[in-house]
Image (cartoon, grey):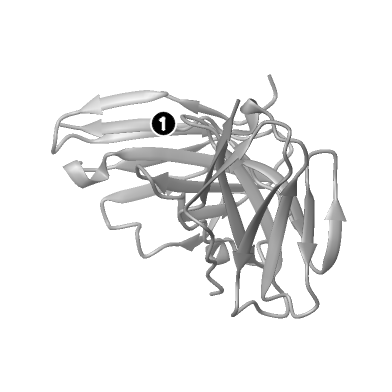
């Protein structure tokens, strides 16, 4: 089971780009990297997923180096509504839900 | 609203009582998951269903916990003889088969007094 390490918290000003890095040294060949966002009193919400190199969607970008031992979630021009906890997960979820480990996540606070 | 729904949203019970939570997944999703989340922690996996079959259970799921998904639609999570340590947010999620993205419901917050 590949566990992840993320910073506990980060602060950023509105309008800035935020990069949250996740370490997953024991990632397996079949594992994908997935990021979720969670607001208080709500369930997590899927943000983005990738296997290698770079993935971009309308919300974020995900950068994964060749060795796949880490990944970086990039949020462009954050706003106050991006204040949330961000979780990095590593696992081959389609074949086994037990491989999903959320950890404690990174609490992002966006400052006006 | 076609998202995942959970009922009730809040439950307060006395220690030793039984409680049951319900989850209605997105209708076309075959997979259904239950998680538990305590303050300051990420969700912890409890169990997962593929249609009506319960395929995986975490070691966290003690004998007092049971989950069902009759007919492969809604699911229930029952906790018998509740303890104060059971106080947590119980989250349900669903996904199509072979999809990584899980869609979470709003959760049921359980308080055991």
Residue B113 position within the rendered picture, expressed as x and y whole percent measured from the top left: 15, 31
Q: Is mark 1 on a helix, strand or loop?
A: strand
Compared with A42, A18 (above or below) is: below
Compared with B44, A4 (above or below) is: below
Query: As drawn, is A31 to the left or to the right of A54?
Result: left
Q: Which of A46 and A10 is in front in this view?
A: A10
Q: Is residue B22 visible?
A: yes
Residue A83 position within the rendered picture, expressed as x and y whole percent measured from the top left: 58, 33
Q: Nearer the viewer, residue A21 or A89?
A: A21
Q: Is residue B83 visible?
A: no
In the rendered view of the protein, which quadrant contains the C terminus of chain A? top right
Compared with B60, B36 (above or below) is: above
State the residue at coordinates (46%, 45%).
B68
Q: How packed is label 1: few (under 14 Cα within 10 Å), some, or many (20 or more)?
A: many
State the residue at coordinates (78%, 41%).
A76
Q: Mark 1 points at which residue?
A: B108
* Subunit bearing disc 1: B
State the residue at coordinates (64%, 33%).
A82
Compared with B70, B24 (above or below) is: above
Q: Which of A106 and B19 is in front in this view?
A: A106
Residue A89 position within the rendered picture, expressed as x and y whole percent measured from the top left: 60, 60
């Amino acid at each position: 089971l590949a566990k992840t390490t993320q910073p506990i918290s980060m602060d950023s000003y509105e309008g800035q780009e935020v990069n949250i890095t996740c370490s997953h040294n024991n990632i397996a060949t079949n594992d994908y990297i997935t990021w979720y966002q969670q607001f208080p009193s709500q369930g997590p919400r899927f943000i983005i997923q990738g296997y290698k190199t770079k993935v971009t969607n309308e919300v974020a970008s995900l950068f994964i180096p060749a060795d796949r031992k880490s990944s970086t979630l990039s949020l462009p021009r954050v706003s106050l509504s991006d204040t949330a906890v961000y979780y990095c997960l590593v696992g081959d979820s389609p074949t086994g839900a037990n491989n999903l480990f959320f950890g404690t996540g990174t609490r992002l606070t966006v400052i006006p | 609203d076609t998202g995942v729904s959970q009922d009730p949203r809040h439950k307060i019970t006395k220690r030793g009582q039984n409680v049951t939570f319900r989850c209605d997944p997105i209708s076309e999703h075959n997979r259904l998951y239950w998680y538990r989340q305590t303050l300051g922690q990420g969700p912890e996996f409890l169990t997962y269903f593929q249609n009506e079959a319960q395929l995986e259970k975490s070691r966290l799921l003690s004998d007092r916990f049971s989950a069902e998904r009759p007919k492969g639609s809604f699911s229930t999570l029952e906790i018998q003889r509740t303890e104060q340590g059971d106080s947590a947010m119980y989250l349900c999620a669903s996904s199509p088969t072979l999809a990584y993205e899980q869609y979470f419901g709003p959760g049921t917050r359980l308080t055991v007094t």
